[in-house]
Amino acid sequence: MNKVKVLKKGRFNSALFSLNPEFLLLLFIYLFCIATYTSSLYFSEVPPILMRGIQPATFPKGLIVLIAFLNSILTYLYFTTKTASNKDLPRIFYKTIFGLFVFVFISHFIDLFLALIIFAFFISYWWGEKNILLILSLSIIFPILVFVLFEVVLGLRFPSGILTNLYYN
């Protein structure tokens, strides 16, 4: 009797061989992790004297393991939680997707940091933060921290743009 309750609670009875888009996405993420981890095994090692921080192959492997771990949590939740009925997506979803497209457009054609500032501002506002001073400080401090992390700490140069040219020139 308990076994029947477990089957009704989760998706064990039909999810293993179904072509549910959520299940296919979980499988795709696992296959992506396997393929990228395998390709990262062929990265060459850097001599210790040339190395700044960790080996080039270590970071992708760690990131792939983290993605696979988070995907395993999603897989567990997929099989153990009740199925929800399909509801219409909220309007904020479409605003966020639109914001991502605008972010890609601005970062590619104008400037990455200008896109970060605009995206951080509008996402904070759209998701319910009404304190404009807090939103402005977040949207200015966040790109500065990203720039400091990648430019100063990691030594990576950003592509040219309106704001980055002010720093580089």
Image (cartoon, rainbow, N blue to C red):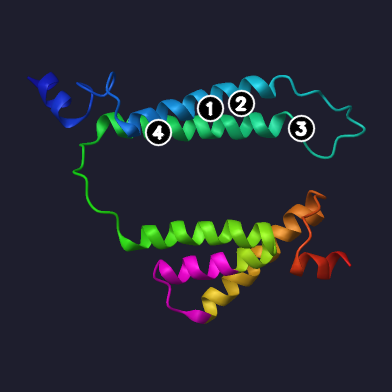
Q: Secondary structure at mark 4?
A: helix
Rendered view: 13 above or below 68: above
Q: Looking at the rendering, which quadrant does residue 71 occupy?
A: top left
Magenta stretch holds residue 36: no
Residue 89: numbered disc:
none
Q: In the rendered view, does 49 fall on the left or right side of 143?
A: right
Q: Between tags 3 and 1, which lies in front? A: 1
Choose the circle earlier in sequence order: 4 or 2.
2
Dot 1: what SS?
Answer: helix
In the picture, the disc for residue 73 is: 4
Residue 56's disc is 3
Mark 4 residue type:
Ile
The amino acid type found where label 1 is placed reads: Phe
Helix, strand or loop under label 3: loop
With 43 as the anchor, is 21 left or right in this view?
left
Q: Quadrant of residue 25?
A: top left
* Mark 2 lies on residue: 36
Name the mark nearer the viewer: 3 or 4: 3
Q: How far is disc 3 from disc 4 in space, using C-alphas?
A: 27 Å
Tell which circle, 3 or 1, labels the residue nearer the N-terminal end. Answer: 1
- Residue at x 73%, y 60% (from the top left corner): 147
Disc 3 marks a residue whose amino acid type is: Pro
Q: Residue furthest left?
A: 1
Query: Which residue is tagged 1?
Result: 32
**Sequence-first tag of 3 and 2:** 2
Kind of element beneath mark 2: helix
Task: Report crowding for label 3: few under 14, some 14 to 19, many 20 or more residues within 10 A (C-alpha).
Answer: some
Give me the residue at 85% from left, 28% from top: 46
Q: CA distance from mark 1 to mark 2?
A: 6 Å
The quadrant of the image that shows the N terminus is top left
- Give the residues in magenta: 118-132
